[in-house]
Image (tube, helix red, strand yellow):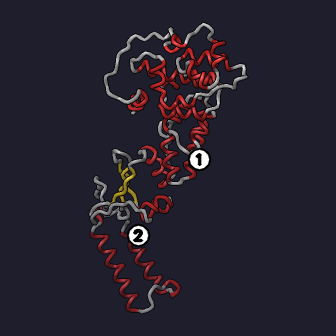
Amino acid sequence: MSLSNLEELKGSYADDEEDTSYKLMEEDDEDDTSCEFIEQFIEQFLSNDEEDVIPNKEMKISKLDKSTNVKILVGSDQVTFVANKIEISQKSTIMSHHLYGPSCSITEKPDNELDEIRFPYLDPNGFSNVFNFWHDNCFEISIDNVIATYKTANIFAVNALEESCIEFITEHLKENNENALKFLDQEGDTTTIIPYICLQYIDTRTLKSEQFLNISYGTFCLILREKECDEIEHINAMHRWAANKCIEMGLLPDRENLLDILGDAKNFIRFPLSWSYKIEPFIKVAVESGILNRDDLTRRGYSELYEKVFPCASKESDQTRVKEEWNVMDCREDETPCTSLTEKVIVNEQ
């Protein structure tokens, strides 16, 4: 603020004193005291003007930016954002509750330090877009940060930014269906609208893609559970993903290892109706893949159909059936103690 601006401020205040419609004090002596306070403030500001322009690299409260009074630490790495509590609380009711509500989680610091509030469960990339949107409506969305941005905007109820993220996701899903797998891997199995949108773009070609083999176990289970598709395509996708994990871990993709890697995902196997024309091809694919055997089908009442599809197969030979086309060059035992291969898969994803 320049000297001329300060003099104008002082003059405008004096003019207001003459206008009874803007009087704040009822007594004349109180008006004089208020004028003296303004004069002292201007003198103090001018005396400290040169010192105030020094940049504050440690993000403490500078003399020029006395409104900055809170430090927001985001993510496990505690990425820092500096703001004014009143300003950001006006931007989001949710943030207002965090700063001033009954569940206030702010850590108060001494006068020469900024107060702190932590959000270790948020992604700094997503929060950065929300933070910039609060301040100047500017943000940069990309394939890598759109899900984190949407989740953060959803948490703080920033509806305009949520809509922008949805538009971006839909546009890129139309360009390439495989982006649905990337978005699902970032979003996870949540109750937001993102999984519902992405699942609509997953088709047979997507399930046969290389990208499908690289999705996380959680995304894999989500697709098996929620995506409506042909039963044979469904179990083929299940076998491809599990067999690929076996090979990555140096294991033979036999029935035992496949079921161990699938874990709870094997509960999502879908059976065609017993009178459907698909039932016999389904049994053939399921048994040859090693995911199902004679006992599994007998328990479900398909014993006669099994014998029809495999008339020469015995119970003993079926239990050791392995697909011959899998050529595993390195089949070694992993000596790391673990209760199941499913847990190994999940640990490797982290």
Q: Residue at x 47, y 40 (%)?
A: 145
- Tag shown at residue 163: 1
Query: Which residue carries the number 2 mark?
Result: 5
Tell me, for residue 131, which label it has, or none. none
Instruction: Give the amino acid type for the residue marked by disc 1 in the picture.
Output: Glu
Residue 349: image x %, image y %?
Answer: 41, 31
Q: Please report the residue visible at 63 percent of the width from the left and 16 percent of the height from the top.
A: 306
Asked whether the viewer can see residue 176, the reply is no
In front: label 1 or label 2: 1
As rendered, which of 43 and 145 lies closer to the eye? 145
Mark 1 or 2, nearer chain start: 2
Query: In the rendered image, is residue 232 in sight?
Result: yes
Counting from the top left corner in percent of width and height, residue 186 is at 48, 37
Q: In percent of the image, x 44 and y 65: which residue is there?
A: 101
In the structure shown, which secondary structural element does the residue marked by tag 1 occupy?
Answer: helix
Q: Position of residue 43 (x, y in %)?
A: 30, 74
Q: Is residue 310 above or below residue 346?
A: above
Q: Amino acid at mark 2?
A: Asn
